[in-house]
Every structure is written in C-alpha cells, then in structure tokens.
C-alpha cells in the first residue's frame, strides 16, 4: 500500500479525542458512538484522514493511562469508523507499542507517536513489521510533562535543537526497517515549548521541510495561539489556528492536524491555489 503521508495537495488530519481530559474537547466524544459520529462529520467537512487519541497530553494535569484503558477507549471507535468511513485512512495517537500493534491489526494506517519513539523501544519494530506510516513528533519528557514547560529549555536556535532530536528519531525508525517514504515529521508546537519557542519553530519550518520528509503541523487551538491572540477559550482559537496553518503551508508543511476541519480545509484550499499560481508564474 502506498504511504498516506504523501499527497498532491495539503492534507487535513481531523482530531478525535477519546479522553475525558483533553485540553480542548475532553469528554465531548468519550463514547464510541459519539466519536464515530464526530469522525464521519469531520470527513464530510473535508478531512483526508482522522487521528484518534485515547491519552491526553494536556498542558496541566495530564494523567498517563495504561495500555488496556487506552485500547478500551480507542478500539470501538476504530472499528466503528472502519465501518462508517472505510475509505478514510485512520491514525492513532499513541506512545505505546501494545496499543499500536492492536490498532494496526484493525486496519489503522498511521501511528502518530508524540514521543517520536522515545518512550517505548518496541514501537519502531511494531510499526516496521506492519508497514505502517508514522508521524514522529518532537517533544521532551513523559506524557504528563511534555505539555508543560518543564523541559522548555532552548538556546538561540530552537529549530536546530528540534531537528537534531528528530534526526535521532529518524535514525531509530529507519534502522528498525521503516521505509523513509513512510515517515513524517512534526515539530511539536506547544510541546515542551513556550510561545516564543513555538513561534520560532513555525517561522523556521522550511528548515525542517528541507530534510525531505512530509511535515505535519499541529497548532490547532494551542496555547501559543491563545497567548498571541488573547483568546482564552480553546474552541474560539479558530482564526489564529488558520493563520498558523496558512503560514506553515507557505513554508512547506503539507499535513495539518486540526479540530475545526471545515475552516481549515477552506483556508488551506485557497492558500494552496495561490501558492500553485505563484509556482506556475515562476516556472
């Protein structure tokens, strides 16, 4: 099967959080029926794929869950979505190889590891054996720490440090047998990063793109957007998210993990048409 990470246009990855405590929509879809209904709606709004998460990494008070609980949350949703939208690739956001193995057996196409293989040595082996696509996201610390500022210590070149740490993850993935074409990179906006760090990373995305892997951006409703706009409620950060995504698109990102799919899809389609027009004019 061809990788789902490479596309001729910007890809929108719709977020489905199956948790009681996610920072933006915790508890809203904490049942298989509601989550599957939400996923089908995101597809109607323009999502190219769906990203399902069963463990929160919220900025305050994120509580790790064991693999059994994570699977109890995720598997019914995966199965329901495979029935409702069988043509849509599914991604699961997990740091656990046991969870990855189970969902890959259910037909999930992408493993989105927010630890970039730091927290479970078996994860790259499991993903390689299944021929899965992987998203390697930059972060520091464990599940309960990566959304905080505990490890938000950087020198003058924030993106340089992010790239260096992601190179380690790339090497781990490729040594395990994961094909280069199945790897995407996420700079981890808001993960172990203060607002100034996230802004610096977004502004230097072209350097990450230059590594030759698809780049994923997950700025949706993040604290950085709230602090830059003065918007406290996460669900009201749509416009700021769109601005971050359009700038990221211009700098070479091609996959966008978002809550508000319809707004993201429309904004990215317009921005993409303008970028393509510029490419044609300078060809």
Image (cartoon, grey):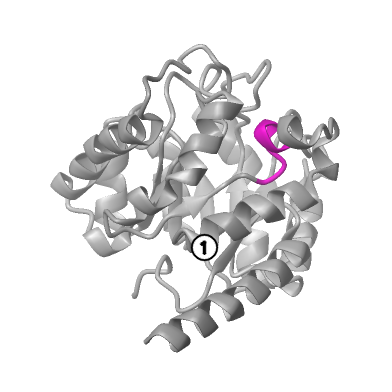
Quadrant where the N terminus is found in the figure: bottom left
Taking the image as shown, residue 144 lies to the left or right of residue 280, namely right
Q: Is residue 215 visible?
A: yes
Q: Secondary structure at mark 1?
A: helix
- The residue drawn where x is 27% and y is 31% is 121
- Which of the 4 image quadrants contains residue 68? top right
Depth check: give the residue in front, 271 or 175: 271
Viewed as shown, does residue 206 lie left or right of 76? left
Above or below 205: residue 161? above
Measuring from the top left, give residue 222's x and y in whole percent. 68, 37
Residue at the far top in the pictured view:
150
Does residue 87 appear in this view?
no
In the image, taking residue 249 as reference, residue 214 lies left or right, namely left
Quadrant assignment for the C terminus: bottom left
Q: Residue at x 55, y 16 (%)?
A: 149
x and y percent of residue 141 in the render?
Answer: 43, 18
Q: Is residue 222 rendered magenta in the image?
A: yes
Q: Going by the picture, which residue comes out furthest to the front?
A: 282
Residue at 60% x, 80% y is: 273
From this view, report whether residue 76 is shown above or below residue 45: above
Q: Viewed as shown, does residue 238 lie left or right of 258?
A: right
Q: Is residue 174 magenta?
A: no
> Which x, y percent locates residue 170?
24, 44
- Say which of 73 and 198 sits in front: 198
In the image, which residues are magenta?
A: 220-225
Q: Residue furthest left?
A: 175
Within 10 Å of the Cα at label 1, are there few (<14), some (14-19), or many (20+) other Cα atoms?
some
Residue on which the image places disc 1: 250
Q: Position of residue 29 (x, y in %)?
A: 79, 45
- Does residue 205 sit above or below 30 in this rendering? below
């Amino acid at each position: 099967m061809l990788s789902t990470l490479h596309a001729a246009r910007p890809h929108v990855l719709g977020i489905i959080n199956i948790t009681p405590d996610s920072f933006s929509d915790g508890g809203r879809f904490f049942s298989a029926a509601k989550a599957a209904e939400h996923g089908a709606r995101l597809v109607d709004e323009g999502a190219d794929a769906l990203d399902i998460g069963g463990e929160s990494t919220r900025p305050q008070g994120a509580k790790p869950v064991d693999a059994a609980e994570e699977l109890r949350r995720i598997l019914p949703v995966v199965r329901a979505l495979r029935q409702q939208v069988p043509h849509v690739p599914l991604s699961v956001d997990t740091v656990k190889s046991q969870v990855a193995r189970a969902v890959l057996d259910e037909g999930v196409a992408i493993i989105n590891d927010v630890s970039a293989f730091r927290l479970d040595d078996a994860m790259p082996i499991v993903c390689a054996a299944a021929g899965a696509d992987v998203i390697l996201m930059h972060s520091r610390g464990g599940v309960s720490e990566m959304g905080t500022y505990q490890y938000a210590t950087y020198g003058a070149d924030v993106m340089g440090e992010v790239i260096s740490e992601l190179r380690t993850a790339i090497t781990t993935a490729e040594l395990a047998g994961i094909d280069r074409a199945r790897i995407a990179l996420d700079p981890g906006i808001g993960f172990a990063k203060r607002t100034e760090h996230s802004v610096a990373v977004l502004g230097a995305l072209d350097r990450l793109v230059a590594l030759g892997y698809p780049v994923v951006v997950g700025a949706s409703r993040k604290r950085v957007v709230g602090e830059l706009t003065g918007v406290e409620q996460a669900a009201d950060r749509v416009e700021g998210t769109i601005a971050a995504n359009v700038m990221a698109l211009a700098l070479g990102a091609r996959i966008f993990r978002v809550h508000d799919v319809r707004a993201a899809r429309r904004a990215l389609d317009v921005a993409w048409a303008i970028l393509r027009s510029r490419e044609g004019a300078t060809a």
